[in-house]
Amino acid sequence: MTVDVYPTRDSVIEKEIKDKVVVVVDVLRATSTIITALYNGCKEVIPVMDIEEAMVMTKNYERDAFLLGGERNAVKIEGFDLSNSPLEYTRDKVEGNTIIFTTTNGTKAIKQAGDAKKVLIGSIINADALCGALLDLDADVAFVCAGTEGRFSLDDIIAVGAIISRLKSKGAQLSLDDLAMVCLYLYESNKSSLHDILKDTYHYKRLLEEGFTDDLKYCLTPNRAPIVPMYKDGVIKNIY
Ligand code: MLT
């Protein structure tokens, strides 16, 4: 299994991912939130590029059949039902609902990876389940990190490392590109203290400043939501 890592969505070379299983990672917080929503019984998540597209999408649904979720500058969008905090996506709020979702980086990365053979949604909270799915699929893998505002984000690199580390410990024969090697090395050298390596990074600090301490703890805890969502035909659903 070859494993390539793209540090930002803009670095993706479309023809390279076409025949691969792509895992999109935005550990802080978009993919963690999507996984949590589906784990808590939401019907589907529809990622959209921006607020205008979200509003157009709402016209396809009765008002009580969808929730609008997402963020700009890490906080809830005016008029939306939910922010991008995974802890808001509780079963009592999301069960049976469609969630129309837009975030600054994560939802764009998912849509951009849409032409790959398969697009899975990854984070630390589903690391073991995702590892199982990748082993079952036994295909070449490309991780697409959402990054933050077009720039490389260390949290995503660590999360990719967590998934590669699990593949390795399950005995997968891996051929890693250089960035995949960096991800694995950084994760394995810091796995007992992920908050320590991330605490001075841009996005982690920003979320702390906004008071999202519990989100940070949740998003960096393995296997809180052991499912594997897949993006297909514009919609994200749970496949495992
Ligand atoms: C994003 O997609 O840009 C992030 O998930 C931002 C956030 O943490 O709210």
Image: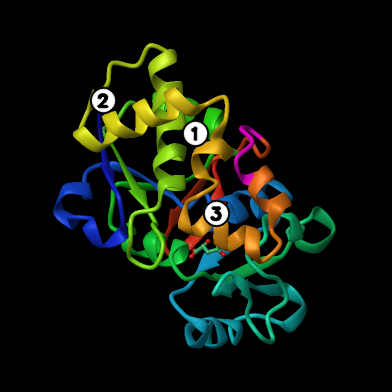
Q: Nearer the viewer, residue 156 or 171?
A: 156
Percent position (x, y) of residue 192?
57, 24
Instruction: Please tell me how crowded label 2 is: few (under 14), some (14-19), or many (20+) other residues with Cα within 10 Å.
Output: some
* Residue 228 vs residue 87, the one in the foreground: 87
* Magenta range: 219-223
Residue 166 vs 32, above or below: the answer is above
Q: Which residue is mark 1?
A: 130
Per the image, is 221 magenta? yes
Q: Amino acid at mark 3?
A: Tyr
Residue 75 in picture, x, y percent from top left: 63, 73
Q: Quadrant of the N terminus?
A: top left
Q: Name the residue beneath numbered marker 2.
A: 1
Q: Nearer the viewer, mark 2 or mark 3?
A: 3
Mark 1 closeness class: few <14, some 14–19, many ≥20 residues within 10 Å = many
Q: Which mark is residue 204?
A: 3
Please tell me whether mark 3 sits on a helix, a strand or a loop. helix
Q: Secondary structure at mark 2?
A: loop
Q: Secondary structure at mark 1?
A: helix
Question: 208 left or right of 109?
Answer: right
Residue 240 in sight: no
